[in-house]
Image (cartoon, coloured by chain):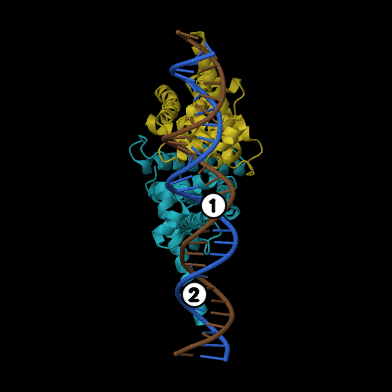
Chain colours: A cyan, B yellow, C brown, D blue
Amino acid sequence: MSSADRRQREIEEIKKKIIDAATELFIDEGYAHVSIRKIAQKIEYSPTTIYNYFRDKEAILHHLLKQGYALFLRYLHAAESEAANRGGDIVHQLRAVMRAYTRFGLEHSDYYKLIFIEDLERRQPFEDCESDRRKGFQLLARLVEQAVAERGAHEADPQQISQILWAAIHGITSLLVTFDDFPWADDRERLVDTLIETQIRGVFGSAARTQNDEAEGIR
Amino acid sequence: MSSADRRQREIEEIKKKIIDAATELFIDEGYAHVSIRKIAQKIEYSPTTIYNYFRDKEAILHHLLKQGYALFLRYLHAAESEAANRGGDIVHQLRAVMRAYTRFGLEHSDYYKLIFIEDLERRQPFEDCESDRRKGFQLLARLVEQAVAERGAHEADPQQISQILWAAIHGITSLLVTFDDFPWADDRERLVDTLIETQIRGVFGSAARTQNDEAEGIR
DNA sequence: TTATTTAAATGAACACTGTTAATATTGGTT
DNA sequence: AACCAATATTAACAGTGTTCATTTAAATAA
């Protein structure tokens, strides 16, 4: 059975080669402007060979997007648990997750564009990608629910608050990523921080600032 | 010269016919999936005829986007001047403009998708469309500057505040428009209102609520 | 090792796409 | 009625995603 195993590895290897070539091309020239033939040429295979590994061109994009979403969720989860382990209070965790969201967008702006623009723009988005997106939102929603339960908020409905926070953080990230040459305020990191603080203040009131935050020098 | 005039009208008429057919198709099937031949068939002309009226397929999209931006700016300006004429204070105007932004997005979600997703997604966006977008932002920025001067804000930098408000309002609009079947909180209008109030509170503090607002029943 | 079976890579082809150049057709002016 | 300019159309090119029949390579059996 060893030869079958080896073959399995070979298949994965070729798949990876295709994905890598496609990623580079998609990012450079945009999904629509990349042809199967170009990808094939880049990996030095015949165009039809690709169809032995992926059902069609969309399947390649799908594979690529799934990778992006996995990375995205890893960012959010890492931020949440790290903040929790540090003993930060619930609002602190919320902040950390929001920051992680934009950090992902800025550090992997190509992925962000692909998964939050290219994917959204398609007629029929991939269901499992949609599910990953929902997972990201629910992570945020859980934190908000807990935070509202602990401290109360101006608007009582946690669902509404989650969606507002999501909107704000998605808004700044997508704008920063798509309008790279817009004259953004001095430092982008600071802009994001100010936005997050504005949201926290708007939702929980200024009482939401804790000694914990002060100690870490959060404005 | 009357025949030349008539011809001029005819040209505009055919252009309009092309744009209208293209609009419908682009909205239904997405820019990438619409072919010149399909547009031609819809208006019962030969495919090549279209090239007598538009340089290429992109030029059609361009024309369409310009229309969308014009409508968008009309929404913002109308809201601003209406709020000003009603004697509303500056924060009131700000609210009105933000609401107008989302109202445009919701009432013309197809346009919104085209101009705020399709356009952003292209490699090289049309400059004059970019300029229209900037105009929209600057309208907001002017109001913010004035509001900050009048009342002060938690964060002193008006530029930063403008960008935060822009991000929030763009965020909620694009999410509402792209995730039409997401389980949004009860009433979407109310969600938008709550988001706007959250922003105002976060930026100007709760002192920002005026008797004027109370009188009009704004929460 | 050789013969046979199985799996993978390919070349040719189809129905499309945007776009161009040459041709046919129309309408207005002498 | 004859001409001419403007407009519409047909034919064609290079390129696209994708399929199918065919060839090549690899794995197994004799």
Residue at 49% across, 35% down: B57
Q: Check disc 2 and report the residue beneath it.
A: A7
Q: Is residue A107 visible?
A: yes
Horizontally, residue A28 falls left or right of residue A139, namely: left
Q: Earlier in the sequence, mark 1 or mark 2?
A: 2
* Location of mark 1 (residue): A136
- Residue located 33% across and 37% down the image: A186
Q: Exactly how many numbered labels are in the figure?
A: 2
Along the line of sight, the residue nearer the viewer: A150 or D13: D13
Q: Which picture quadrant has residue A24?
A: bottom left
Name the chain letter of the residue that bears numbered label 1.
A
The residue closer to the viewer here, B5 or B90, is: B5
Report the side of B198 relative to A189 (left or right): right
Residue B198, visible in the rendered structure? no
Which chain is disc 2 placed on? A
Q: Residues within 10 Å of mark 1 (few under 14, many from 20)?
A: many
Residue B8 in the image: state x and y as whole percent: 50, 16
